[in-house]
Image (tube, grey):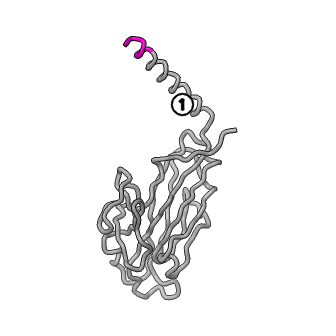
Amino acid sequence: VLSAGIITGELENTGLDGGGNALAASGGIDANWDVDGSDAVTYKHPAYAANDGDSLWISSNSSGGNETSQSTEYTFETTFDLTGYDASTAMITGSWGVDNYASIFLNGVDTGVSLSFGSPAFNVLTDFVISDHFISGINTLSVLVTNGYDTDLSREPGPMALRFDNLQLTAVPEPGSLALLGLGLVGLGLSRRKQSNKG
């Protein structure tokens, strides 16, 4: 029986460049996450949980999206590819935080993972698991963030940001992709043997 393995290079934490390195805490352009169709940018408010070496807070701009005077919604988005894996076995685990409150969607379906209004949403990161709504091929992970007060939508909302840390994507490889990998490794071994025999 095949077991699920970690898929690397497909689903990245927030606040990283194309090489997986942490950006500057403010103004760095995230290589993996977009917000409303534009590049997400790093932003850090003193009240937020501390950034670390492989995960930073991101927003719509380096001032925390402070361009609105009332409650506004933002959609953060990233994609990952499950080609060669059994989508029914896929799972995402990690921790996240948001200012002000948010829900996570996978391929347009509400996963039921959300954070409510209040300082615990951004003072600490909260663990989560997503184990449904995956599809074969390209998947879209999106987060609908509301920057605003849940009881007073006309109140000036202040900054807005999102953070994901310790993101891990796992799935069971499809038998066909394992067979191809095995053939490739056998071919590589044979070509190396031929080269060593020549020497």
- Is 198 inside the magenta-drawn segment? yes
- Residue 151 is situated, as x and y percent measured from the top left of the image, at 52, 87
Q: Which residue occupies the foreground of this view, 151 or 194?
A: 194
Q: Residue shown at 44%/77% (left/top)?
A: 147
Q: Identify the residue shown where x is 31% and y is 70%.
A: 62
Q: Quadrant of the N terminus?
A: top right
Q: Position of residue 144 (x, y in %)?
A: 49, 68
Q: Is residue 15 above or below residue 190?
A: below
Q: Is residue 16 left or right of residue 152?
A: left
The foreground one among 37 and 54 is 54
Q: What amino acid type is highlighted by mark number 1?
A: Leu
The span picked out in magenta is 194-199
Which secondary structure lies at badge 1? helix
Number of marks = 1
Tell me which residue sits at (62%, 67%) in the image.
112
Residue 18 locus on image (x, y percent): 35, 51
Mark 1, residue position: 181
Residue in view at x 42 percent, y 62 percent = 55
For mark 1, does the 10 Å Cα neighbourhood hold few (<14), some (14 to 19), or many (20 or more) residues?
Answer: few
